[in-house]
């Protein structure tokens, strides 16, 4: 595993760019879900580095330690925290990348370490991270606990804010993959917000400063991921930490990491977090952000929820008895993991965009038949494709009876999955027949061309 701490002499103060991204990126964190074990070795390397002060600041509900990492000795204070929601881990990876840059780029570090003190709390919710849940072990959303304070993690975060009195707070989250960047036909890979602290959405001096910093970050996003930046909904949320910390006079900046096409583990958003946090540090230490007016912030389009679908099949013909009609289908692959892909919606889906889109004009829906398995069975690709060509789309068996050596997805069920018409909420297992004789099997939401055996899409945005 590549060390988080590299010799500073090997790296000069290079601009953060695609060319030297690998210089900062720590290994082992390119995955959909980051758990406590994934960061243990990286955290230990930070503990061993005298540039940083690592302080245990409390424990989760189940007793897992939560740490604060500190660097710098300046009067302006920044507090960054990640993975308040346990299943939102992109920024945790990015924080360790940022720490790597701090450790390796001496010239860059020296430009701000006497002006800024930076506090980082990676993985605020280790219990949720372990179970890949939004909530903590109590089943409580920590980010809806800023007033009730019934979670130890929420109490800890508020205590840190009161003790440290940061000038700037960076609230690092993930958003679901279905947001679009305004009216652009792209997913919102990053969404930004200076949260409101009252229903009137007043702009205090602290919120004004947050908006100015975001204006600087917009320039970076426009250059590196054009038309993939959105602004998060700024409706006042009285139970949320960002809104409450903004009300305490902290210039609070929300960074939401989102999807990018063909990027299942959000490594594009991970890189953008590193670049944006580095840019924020530079602009705050120099004061250059104060030159921004609010027009840049206000020009960021609000992201639109629910615009994207994992798979979008358009203009598919369905025939049930004597009745014929045409519909669009949206398939939800249930990422990450893709355990229960399903038909999400049926009908006129023209307002939506798909991460994978398939024009089903001239194709007709066909229900899948079940193939009964009575004994252990090894499934190779040739035999499986033969069954699919005969219309068998799922196996009536337990998963333990099948040894799938085909390299293709399979579906198993003890009950019938044969639907005469596509229905929302049902499994994404059916066939498409073209009028020229071509066939496509849709198995667990993946489209398999039965002529070539090629899978046309993947469990990836």
Image: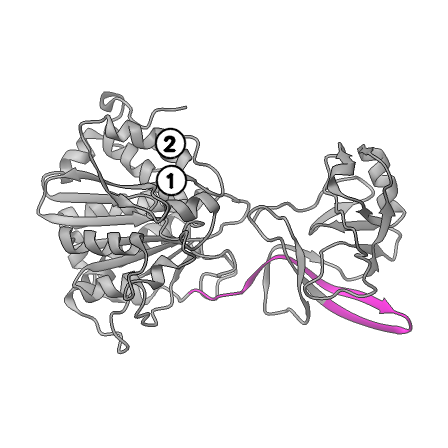
Please tell me which of labels 2 and 1 falls first in the chain. Answer: 2
**Residue ID at (77%, 70%):** 326
Instruction: Assess whether mark 1 and mark 2 are in contact (beta carbons under 8 angstroms).
Output: yes
**Residue 36 versus residue 383: which sits nearer the camera?**
36
| Quarter containing the N terminus | top left
Q: Which residue is mark 1?
A: 93
Which span is picked out in magenta? 303-327
Residue 157 in sight: yes
Element on which disc 2 rests: loop
Mark 2 crowdedness (10 Å alpha carbons): few <14, some 14-19, many ≥20 = many
Q: Position of residue 355 (x, y in %)?
A: 59, 54
**Residue 129 versus residue 439: which sits nearer the camera?**
129
Q: Position of residue 438 (x, y in %)?
A: 85, 50
**Residue ID at (79%, 51%):** 414
User: What label does residue 34 carry, if any?
Assistant: none
Residue 194 in sight: no
Most frequent secondary structure within the magenta stretch? strand
Side of 189 relative to 154 (left or right): right
**Residue ID at (39%, 66%):** 301
Q: Is residue 167 above or below residue 277?
A: below
Element on which disc 1 rests: helix
Q: Quadrant of residue 419?
A: bottom right
Q: Quadrant of residue 103?
A: top left
Q: Which residue is mark 2?
A: 26
């Amino acid at each position: 595993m590549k060390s988080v701490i590299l010799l500073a002499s090997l790296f000069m103060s290079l601009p953060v760019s695609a060319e030297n991204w690998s210089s900062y990126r720590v290994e082992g964190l390119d995955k959909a879900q980051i758990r406590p074990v994934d960061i243990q070795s990286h955290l230990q390397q930070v503990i061993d580095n005298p540039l940083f002060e690592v302080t245990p600041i409390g424990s989760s509900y189940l007793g897992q330690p939560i740490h604060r990492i500190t660097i710098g000795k300046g009067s302006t204070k920044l507090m960054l925290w990640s993975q308040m929601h346990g299943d939102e881990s992109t920024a945790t990876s990015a924080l360790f990348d940022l720490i790597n840059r701090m450790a390796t780029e001496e010239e860059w570090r020296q430009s701000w370490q006497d002006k800024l003190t930076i506090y980082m709390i990676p993985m605020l919710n280790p219990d949720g991270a372990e179970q890949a849940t939004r909530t903590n072990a109590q089943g409580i959303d920590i980010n809806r606990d800023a007033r009730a304070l019934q979670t130890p993690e929420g109490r800890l975060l508020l205590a840190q804010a009161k003790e440290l009195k940061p000038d700037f707070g960076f609230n690092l989250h993930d958003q679901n993959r279905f947001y679009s960047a305004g009216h652009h036909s792209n997913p919102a890979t990053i969404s930004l917000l200076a949260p409101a602290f009252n229903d009137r959405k007043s702009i205090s001096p602290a919120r004004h400063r947050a908006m100015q910093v975001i204006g600087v970050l917009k320039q970076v996003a426009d250059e590196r991921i054009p038309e993939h930046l959105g602004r998060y909904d700024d409706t006042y949320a009285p139970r949320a930490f960002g809104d409450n910390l903004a009300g305490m006079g902290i210039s609070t900046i929300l960074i939401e990491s989102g999807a990018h096409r063909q990027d299942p583990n959000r490594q594009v958003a991970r890189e953008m977090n590193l670049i944006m946090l580095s840019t924020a540090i530079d602009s705050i230490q120099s004061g250059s952000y104060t030159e921004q007016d609010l027009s840049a912030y206000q020009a960021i389009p609000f992201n639109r929820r629910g615009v994207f679908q994992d798979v979008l099949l358009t203009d598919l013909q369905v025939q049930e008895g004597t009745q014929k009609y045409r519909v669009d289908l949206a398939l939800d692959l249930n990422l990450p993991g893709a355990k229960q892909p399903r038909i999400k919606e049926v009908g006129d889906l023209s307002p939506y965009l798909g991460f994978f889109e398939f024009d089903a004009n001239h194709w007709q829906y066909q229900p899948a038949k079940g193939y009964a398995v009575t004994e252990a069975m090894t499934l190779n690709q040739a035999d499986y494709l033969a069954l699919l060509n005969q219309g068998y789309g799922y196996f009536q068996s337990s998963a333990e009876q099948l040894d799938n050596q085909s390299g293709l997805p399979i579906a198993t069920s003890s009950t019938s999955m044969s639907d005469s018409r596509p229905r929302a909420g049902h499994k994404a297992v059916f066939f498409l027949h073209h009028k020229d004789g071509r066939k496509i099997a849709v198995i667990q939401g993946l489209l398999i061309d039965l002529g070539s055996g090629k899978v046309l899409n993947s469990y990836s945005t």
